[in-house]
Image (tube, coloured by chain):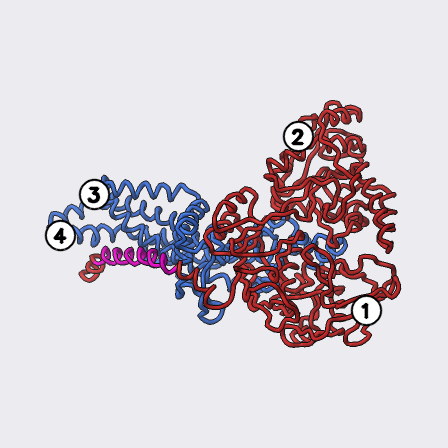
């Protein structure tokens, strides 16, 4: 009892001591922190600390066909082709190529290239990769035609034999990364890592490419460390030795990390914080048009819209109703108020950087004309319809939809908005959910940067299961567009092909197949001493980054 | 005693089964995991194939039975997104969460108790009023707001402390890593532990204060004073000691909620623990991680309750719930 009493007597002193220690440990880092930020730049080479909103998960380059993942892996792996800062196709691991005839291509491979583990790069690796990318579990099967035949001519030459002509054969090969056959066979990574595997191979967390950087450690969702590949075959303009990538999901934390100097580069900067990042003397924001186009879909397949008060018919089957909706939306107001001037209105389902024509323009904003179109179509009092929108997929997606709702209210249309997380949204509006949407928002970047992808994904006829244009959410269908798309696919004469693309876009515009809204803007935040090229496909490529 | 323990154990298993079942029913409303697993261009036929291979087409009770069967063998499957075994991922993330939770709990105790004692002893001093005002803020401000305020004050404005992450960590063998042995690690834990511990701190402070006020009115304190004991002996030796039983109970129980509710703090500070893993999993509909995490939290709570129950029986012979001779 007596001893215990002493213990309790001592307690206040112990507490005071602990508090003292606590205040010390708060106080000490003031100096330590400043030393810390200064030291890495001096001691070793330059390190770029990069934070992105999402995580980098499996490192298998064929597991997920998604821009951020493929962009990150593009620092480590290389394809036969590459794209320069303006997205033009340039030689990569293939030094040159030629079309022997429309069905027969020959690729000459770069000599003296080595993978990060020292294995030489040869034609065997290309053939192996072409088989692997088409194998079960790959998400990048569309990179090469399924029925194409790949033949090794010699160690540095590969022939590709096609069943039908393909003018855009290698449009997506900058992200069809070549893997090392020997390495894959040695470590057990021949199979593509897939979610259904019970024992995924090491390609989920290791990478072995020919690129200018290597991944030295990878903890998904925590930190990934890239180191410069000392034996890289080419010259790069970057002065970085190391890149530390951390995901920071919370918008305000990400911005705070940049402002406080804990990271050097962040993506994205929320549009409402861009001014703040620009105003800070140590940071800057890089903005530019992104290739993704955001648009609205009308359901034109259903005979009756379940969310509408119009029974027995589907008002969206009438092109005039669609055009009325189009002309009721004040795109300039959306871009000024919601996107803070960081969006570009577009007339087509493709970004103007990829395709544009002087005569293909947006229908003007004209609520009076819209009201008249609606009245003429037999809906003088408007009608009610439901709308599906994601709320965490595109920049300010839910706010844009809210604006559309209030603009359409002015012509008498009542919209019941259903804004939901992307995981729920896509489950509802895509094929597995039976395309269960009457009016919806979607964004699209053609992965080949070519219009054929736009037509065949978004605008060709489809059936209920999604056969045809799988992402044609509204089921717009015009046989002429289908015919043109089929011809565009195989036409190798550029002038003829461009003319057919023009015709197809003209039809889409005249039919008001969709309502194209805008291109959103890329917004990266960086410390002033970071120099980096922002390419409009939103890949973050370290070999164009330097720290001054 | 043994019969009581066994009965409690069976109840605990029942509770976990119910948690697993409820979470499985909820997964149906989270969204489509397959659309998060493939790129935009992947055709519907391949998506359907993947869904079938993952067993997502099976009726919910079949999926549930499969999950329980595997979980009984400690096999929680492969994360859809990260494509590594869930048990490994959780083992890697657990140390970060436990470290943060324990530091927060200690912080709450070490700061909250003296504040409670002081406000109990001098209820009308201006310092007590200040403490009470702070505790009001601690109870009423949401965690994420406190976290962001701290980041903007101490990281952005003063540049004193890191704004996110765990700093450098040291491996202690196996999956266990600690940030408590490096300078950046120690700097990094300050803001998140304050954020996470603030609510518990105010809770403990108010609890100690209330108990102190009550105890100080009792007869034995009056007699102790009459006997001429020193103030310190009375206040700390007798009064505080008698307030500690409920404080210890609450602290123990709160440790469970600190671990479970570290999700928000971990998200604000990008603290690489289990909570962050869980939140990322929810956004991506990574069902294996969600299921395993919920089960683990249920396990932690039942374990803590189980120990507390056993302690009650051991400490207080009056609590003989049904089972014993009475």
Which one is in front in this view, the residue at disc 1 or the one at disc 4?
1
Instruction: From the image, give the main secondary structure of the stretch colored magenta.
Output: helix
Label 1 sits on a secondary structure element that is strand
Q: Which residues are magenta?
A: A10-32
Q: Please name the color used to draw chain B.
A: blue
Image spot of residue A101 (x, y percent): 88, 64
**In the image, which lettered chain appears red?**
A
Cα gap from disc 2 to disc 3, whole angstroms:
68 Å
Residues flagged by tags 2 and 3 on a common chain:
no
Image spot of residue B199 (x, y percent): 39, 47
Q: Which residue is tagged 4?
A: B229
* Disc 3: host chain: B
Image spot of residue A397 (x, y percent): 63, 41
Q: Which residue is tagged 3?
A: B217
Judge whether residue A11 is colored magenta.
yes
Residue at 82%, 68% in the rendered image: A106
In the image, taking residue A25 as reference, residue B264 lies left or right, namely right
In the image, taking residue B165 as reference, residue B108 lies left or right, namely left
Q: Which residue is tagged 2?
A: A407
Q: Nearer the viewer, residue A269 or A542?
A: A542
Label 3 sits on a secondary structure element that is loop
Cα gap from disc 1 to disc 4, whole angstroms:
95 Å
Which one is in front in this view, the residue at disc 4 or the one at disc 2?
2
| Up-down relation of residue B271 to residue A477 (above or below) | below
| Up-down relation of residue A271 to residue B260 (above or below) | above
Residue at 66%, 41% in the rendered image: A389
């Amino acid at each position: 009892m007596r001893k215990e009493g002493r213990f309790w007597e001592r307690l206040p002193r112990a507490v005071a001591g602990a508090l003292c220690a606590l205040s010390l440990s708060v106080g000490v880092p003031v100096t330590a922190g400043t030393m810390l930020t200064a030291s890495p730049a001096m001691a070793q080479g330059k390190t770029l600390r990069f934070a992105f909103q999402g995580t980098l998960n499996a490192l298998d380059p064929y597991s997920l066909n998604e821009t951020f993942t493929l962009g990150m892996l593009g620092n480590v792996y290389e394809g036969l082709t590459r794209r320069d800062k303006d997205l033009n196709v340039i030689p990569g691991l293939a030094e040159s190529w030629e079309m022997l005839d429309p069905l027969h291509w020959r690729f000459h491979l770069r000599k003296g290239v080595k993978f990060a583990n020292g294995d030489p790069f040869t034609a065997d690796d290309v053939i192996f990769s072409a088989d692997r990318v088409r194998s079960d579990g790959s998400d990048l099967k569309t990179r090469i035609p399924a029925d194409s035949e790949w033949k090794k001519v010699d160690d540095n030459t590969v022939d590709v034999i096609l069943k039908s002509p393909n003018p855009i054969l290698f449009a997506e090969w900058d992200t069809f990364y070549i893997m090392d056959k020997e390495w894959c066979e040695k470590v057990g990574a021949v199979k593509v890592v897939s979610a259904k595997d019970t024992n995924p191979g090491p390609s989920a967390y290791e990478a072995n490419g020919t690129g200018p950087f290597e991944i030295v450690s990878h903890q998904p969702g925590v930190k990934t460390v890239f180191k410069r590949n000392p034996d890289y075959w080419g010259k790069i303009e970057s002065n970085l030795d190391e890149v530390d990538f951390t995901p920071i999901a919370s918008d305000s934390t990400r911005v705070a990390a940049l402002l406080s100097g804990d990271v050097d580069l962040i993506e994205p900067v929320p549009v409402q914080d861009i001014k703040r990042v620009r105003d800070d003397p140590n940071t800057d924001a890089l903005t530019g048009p992104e290739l993704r186009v955001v648009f609205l879909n009308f359901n034109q397949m259903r005979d009756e819209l379940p969310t509408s008060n119009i029974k027995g018919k589907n008002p969206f089957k009438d092109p005039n109703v669609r055009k009325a909706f189009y002309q009721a939306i004040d795109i300039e107001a959306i871009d000024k108020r919601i996107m803070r001037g960081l969006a570009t209105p577009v007339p087509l389902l493709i970004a103007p950087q990829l395709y544009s024509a002087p005569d293909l323009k947006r229908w003007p904003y004209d609520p009076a004309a819209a009201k008249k179109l609606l009245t003429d179509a037999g809906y003088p009092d408007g009608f009610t319809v439901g709308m599906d929108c994601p709320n965490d997929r595109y920049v300010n997606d839910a706010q844009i939809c809210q604006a559309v709702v209030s603009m359409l209210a002015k012509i008498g249309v009542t919209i019941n908005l259903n804004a939901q997380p992307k995981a729920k949204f896509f489950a509802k509006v895509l094929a597995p959910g039976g395309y269960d949407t009457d009016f919806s928002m979607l964004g699209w970047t053609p992965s080949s940067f070519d219009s054929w992808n736009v037509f065949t994904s978004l605008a060709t006829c489809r059936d209920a299961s999604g056969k045809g244009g799988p992402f044609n959410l509204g089921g717009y269908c015009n046989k002429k567009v289908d015919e043109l798309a089929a011809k565009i696919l195989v036409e190798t004469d550029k002038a003829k092909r461009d003319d057919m693309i023009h015709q197809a876009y003209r039809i889409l515009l005249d039919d008001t197949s969709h309502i194209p809204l805008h291109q959103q803007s890329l917004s990266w935040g960086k410390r002033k001493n970071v120099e980096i090229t922002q390419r409009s496909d939103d890949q973050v490529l370290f070999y164009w980054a330097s720290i001054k | 005693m043994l019969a009581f323990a066994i009965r409690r154990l069976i109840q605990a298993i029942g509770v976990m089964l119910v948690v697993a079942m409820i979470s499985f029913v909820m997964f149906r409303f989270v969204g489509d995991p397959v659309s998060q697993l493939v790129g935009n261009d992947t055709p519907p036929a391949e998506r359907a194939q993947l869904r079938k291979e993952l067993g997502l087409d099976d009726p919910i009770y079949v999926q549930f039975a499969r999950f329980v069967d595997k979980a009984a063998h400690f096999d929680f499957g492969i994360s859809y997104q990260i494509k590594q075994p869930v048990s490994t991922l959780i083992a890697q993330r657990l140390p970060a969460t436990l470290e943060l939770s324990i530091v927060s709990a200690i912080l709450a105790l070490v700061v909250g108790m003296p504040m409670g004692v002081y406000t109990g002893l001098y209820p009308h001093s201006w310092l007590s009023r200040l403490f009470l005002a702070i505790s009001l803020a601690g109870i009423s401000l949401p965690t994420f707001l406190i976290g962001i305020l701290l980041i903007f004050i101490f990281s952005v404005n003063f540049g004193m402390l890191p704004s996110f992450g765990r700093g450098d960590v040291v491996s202690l063998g196996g999956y266990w890593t600690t940030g408590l042995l490096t300078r950046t690690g120690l700097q990094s834990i300050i803001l998140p532990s304050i954020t996470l511990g603030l609510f518990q701190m105010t809770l403990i402070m108010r609890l100690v204060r209330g108990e102190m006020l009550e105890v100080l009115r009792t007869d034995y304190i009056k007699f102790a004073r009459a006997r001429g004991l020193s103030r310190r002996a009375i206040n700390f030796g007798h009064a505080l000691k008698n307030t500690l039983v409920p404080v210890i109970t609450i602290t123990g129980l709160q440790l469970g909620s600190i671990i479970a509710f570290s999700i928000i703090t971990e998200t604000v500070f990008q603290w690489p623990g289990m909570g962050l893993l869980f939140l990322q999993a929810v956004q991506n509909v990574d069902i294996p991680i969600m299921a395993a995490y919920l089960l683990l939290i249920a396990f932690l709570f039942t374990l803590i309750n189980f120990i507390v129950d056993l302690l009650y029986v051991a400490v207080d012979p009056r609590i003989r719930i049904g089972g014993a001779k009475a």
